[in-house]
Image (cartoon, helix red, strand yellow):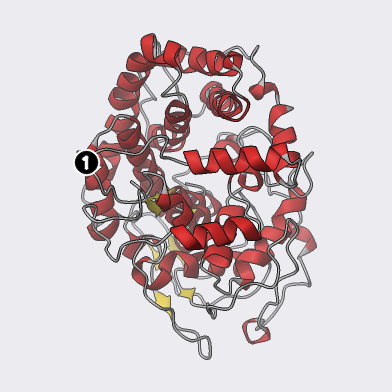
């Protein structure tokens, strides 16, 4: 479930292209982000400074980092080589953008060029599609940050982009089109599988200026027949008595009556130890008759992104999202109070499923929120031909945090190519996995702004009407740490999809 939510967030992060050319950089970090973060770092403000200190202190963020590129990967045996190198490439490329030191760009370019000239295969079993989606998205983000580093453009960029298309994108599209692995049984895989591949395909489309692929994925988000489509990724929406309705929006974050946010609220409420409405869910291999405790309380670094968009920019009442953000921040090793990022908070596949770094990249103060509100109007359309202000994106990143880890904010839609597919994936995972119900409730999303927008959020005022029963209070002690997922987990079984 955690993985599905993250994948939904990842997908929701990008928005429809409005002009003949993509905006660059236009994925998880755009030019506006770079300028904003530079200003915060120069003023030595937290949480940006503290979060950046965590990033720059990692082995992955050093210019001396050595890549481990190989020609063939298998998720169960050696994909950790790619997890680590993706973490390093992104961290180093980001350091270059923020500090301007070419040694970091050169180190990142060396990693991307090595994989671009070496990688041929992601494996032969179905797990190859998890690698294609999760790491494809991450590597594309690193490449996007490095696209204007002249030595890379002259030597390595073409090889890297070609590899991303031939190895990663080819598998992304194969999976989304239900070729071979799920032909005829489109609900065989949970939402996170499709959503992370959709996010990767969108990211590679932006990286390579591929409008056709971009349009295909956004259309699938709206009309697809697999669990990555918005109507299936977050299924069986119900209205809980007394919670009220949601006002329809126009960007993918607001798509289908704020469906992604409903999923995120449901996911957070459940994972904080509360009862939630549940409707039995079945696919071709599993039948869920009751909500499971498997991986309950697990977390991924996506909640700063959700809170900044829905709670701050839109000023909506998001009590469970805020509560889950507060719950998760102190749990990242070595960085209490700062949301973790790729490679910073543990080992194992789940720790490398999301770029993260929300306290650095997505945290907003009052001044940032005001600026975003003044310039972030999104056109009233869900089609790829219409648009947001100077943006190529549609909020696909945020969904995955609610479903697992694979769309995110209007502010992102303002100057990026994303479509909010990333966030959707996260929400979707919550709805479709063993840890969550297939019923999502609207939990009173009002237009009232949260009481706190500072670096440390005040505890959420959780509506008592939703506290039908608590497993314990305020946070279940059994869920105070990240549950350990089995080594070499099989995402085809019912417990860990």
Which residue occupies 30% across, 51% down? 16
Single out the residue that lies furthest toward the bottom.
242
Name which residue lies at 63% across and 14% down.
65
The quarter holding residue 93 reads top right
- Judge from the rendering whether residue 338 lies leftward or rightward of residue 226; answer left or right: right
Percent position (x, y) of residue 182? Answer: 27, 45
- Image quadrant where residue 369 sits: bottom right
Depth order, front residue of 244/430:
244
Whole-percent x and y of residue 159? Answer: 34, 14
Q: Is residue 164 above or below residue 463?
A: above
Q: Which residue is mark 1?
A: 20
Is any atom of residue 359 visible in this view?
yes
Residue nearer the viewer, 348 or 125: 348
As drawn, 337 above or below 70: below
Task: Judge whether 163 appears above or below 393 on screen.
Answer: above
The answer to whether one can see residue 180 in this image is: no
Please report the residue visible at 36 percent of the width from the left and 41 percent of the height from the top.
Answer: 197
Indicate the position of residue 245 as horizontal and vertical percent values. Answer: 44, 83
Query: In percent of the image, x 58 and y 78: which residue is there?
Result: 448
């Amino acid at each position: 479930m955690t993985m599905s939510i993250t994948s939904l967030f990842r997908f929701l992060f990008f928005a429809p292209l409005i002009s003949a050319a993509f905006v660059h950089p236009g994925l998880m970090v755009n030019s506006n982000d770079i300028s904003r973060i530079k200003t915060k770092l120069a003023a030595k403000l937290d949480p940006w400074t503290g979060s950046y200190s965590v990033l720059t202190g990692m082995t992955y963020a050093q210019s001396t980092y050595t890549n481990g590129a190989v020609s063939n990967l298998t998720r169960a045996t050696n994909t950790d080589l790619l997890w680590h190198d993706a973490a390093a490439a992104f961290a180093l490329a980001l350091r270059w953008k923020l500090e301007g030191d070419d040694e970091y760009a050169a180190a990142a370019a060396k990693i991307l060029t090595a994989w671009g000239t070496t990688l041929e295969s992601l494996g032969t079993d179905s797990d190859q599609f998890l690698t294609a989606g999760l790491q494809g998205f991450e590597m594309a983000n690193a490449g996007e940050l490095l696209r204007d580093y002249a030595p890379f453009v002259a030597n390595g960029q073409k090889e890297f982009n070609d590899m991303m298309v031939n190895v990663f994108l080819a598998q992304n599209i194969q999976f989304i089109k239900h070729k071979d692995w799920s032909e005829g049984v489109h609900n065989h895989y949970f939402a996170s599988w499709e959503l992370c591949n959709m996010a990767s395909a969108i990211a590679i489309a932006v990286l390579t200026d591929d409008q056709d692929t971009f349009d295909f994925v956004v259309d699938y988000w709206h009309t697809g027949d697999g669990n990555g489509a918005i109507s299936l990724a977050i299924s069986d929406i119900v209205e809980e008595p007394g919670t009220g309705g949601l006002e329809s929006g126009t960007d993918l974050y607001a798509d289908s009556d704020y469906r992604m946010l409903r999923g995120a609220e449901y996911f957070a409420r459940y994972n904080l130890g509360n009862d939630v409405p549940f409707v039995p869910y079945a696919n071709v291999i599993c039948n869920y008759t009751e909500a499971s405790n498997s991986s309950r309380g697990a977390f991924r670094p996506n909640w700063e992104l959700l809170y900044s968009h829905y709670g701050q920019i839109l000023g909506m009442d998001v009590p469970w999202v805020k509560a889950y953000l507060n719950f998760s921040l102190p749990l990242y090793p070595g960085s209490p109070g700062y949301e973790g990022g790729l490679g910073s908070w543990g080992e194992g596949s789940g720790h490398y499923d999301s770029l993260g770094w929300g306290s650095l990249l997505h945290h907003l103060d009052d001044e940032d929120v005001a600026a975003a509100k003044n310039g972030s109007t999104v056109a009233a359309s869900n089609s790829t031909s219409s648009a947001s202000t100077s943006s190529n994106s549609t909020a696909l990143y945020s969904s995955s945090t609610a479903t697992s880890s694979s769309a995110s904010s209007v502010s992102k839609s303002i100057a990026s190519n994303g479509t909010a597919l990333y966030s959707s994936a996260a929400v979707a995972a919550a709805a479709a996995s063993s840890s969550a119900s297939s019923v999502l409730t609207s939990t009173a999303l009002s237009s009232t702004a949260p009481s706190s927008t500072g670096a440390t959020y005040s505890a959420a005022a959780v509506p008592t009407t939703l506290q039908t029963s608590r497993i314990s209070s305020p946070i279940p002690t059994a869920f105070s740490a990240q549950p350990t997922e089995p080594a070499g987990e099989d995402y085809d079984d019912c417990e860990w999809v």
